[in-house]
Amino acid sequence: MSVDGVGMGQGEDGADEPGWDVDPDDESGAAVVAAVGRQIKAWREAAGMRAGEFGAAMGYGEDLVYKVEGGRRIPRPEFLDRADEVAGAGGKIAAMKQDVAEVRYPKKVRELAKLEAQAVELSAYGSHNLHGLLQTEEYARALFGMRRPAFSPDEVERLVAARMARQSIFDRSPGPELSFVQEEVTLRRHLGGRMVLRRQLEHLLEVGQLRNVEIQVMPTGRDDHAGMGGEMQVLKFRDGSAVGRSEGDFGSRPVSDPKHLRIVELRCGIIRAQALTPRESLAFIEQVLGET
């Protein structure tokens, strides 16, 4: 997943500032970024270069160099590659890309991505919008862009990149079993415009063909519906443990207690039984696409 073009700002000298601001509430992430910044500064000084010279040699502004070295800006991978080359670090700065990659997204998203990466089974029900793992980049950008209070453009791009990174779950081998139930309205709401929705529906049809993925639609006309409380999700792991979340229940927090999990799993199972079958659902999505 490429993050090129993500989080672009303008420094005081007009130079582009790739990367993201550090979240002060993310203590572990801030510590990693600060450590990386100190290493870059040490290599720059060892090379006998001032911050302005170093930045100019890399193609970045002096202000960005100071922010990265001071742990106030999360650098993009290409910044680290250029810093390594200019400072003559022999790959030692570039090697920190993995450390930075693990903290470049918001803490809550990192925690969710970690759980998804370990899961062998995922069951989810979405009522207001499509599940994040099913979203196209432009659909996700439209979704984050309409939040109120509004996110800054920088934060929107950071959240979009994080959401797209989570979709590496589809590349795992063997892949986890993924089951999604979506409300009919999530297929018809023109978030981002008609063409964004059309491409999103086409994407659903592609993902729905994967052998380990089932997408079901809950028609609006159903008389019985076990998901009226809101969205929910259950993740199961190889060791037999699980974690679930149900909107409006248990403080809307993730739960692993067997009694609470049983409730969420029960609802997810009933919702799947009440929805269209996977084959019927793909046909329904094709019909909606034709009408859009």
Image (tube, rainbow, N blue to C red):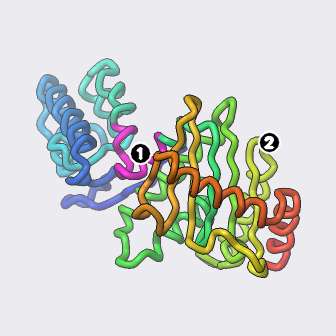
Drawn side of residue 269 relative to residue 5, left or right? right
Q: What residue appears at the point 64 percent right and 34 percent down from the top-left corner?
A: 172
Q: Are marks 1 and 2 in contact (CB under 8 Å)?
A: no
Categorize mark 2 by other alpha carbons within 10 Å: few (<14), some (14-19), many (20+): few
Which structural element holds mark 1?
A: helix
Residue 98: x and y in percent read 39, 31
Residue numbers of the magenta segment: 100-114
Amino acid under label 2? Arg
Residue 171: x and y in percent read 65, 37
Going by the picture, which residue comes out furthest to the top?
Answer: 90
Amino acid under label 1? Glu
Is residue 134 visible from the viewing direction of this image? no
Q: Quadrant of the C terminus?
A: bottom right
The magenta stretch spans residue 105:
yes
Q: Main secondary structure of the magenta part?
A: helix
User: Where is mark 2, residue-wise?
Assistant: 211
User: Where is mark 1, residue-wise?
Assistant: 111
Going by the picture, which residue comes out furthest to the front?
Answer: 259
Q: What residue appears at the point 38 percent right and 49 percent down from the top-left corner?
A: 105
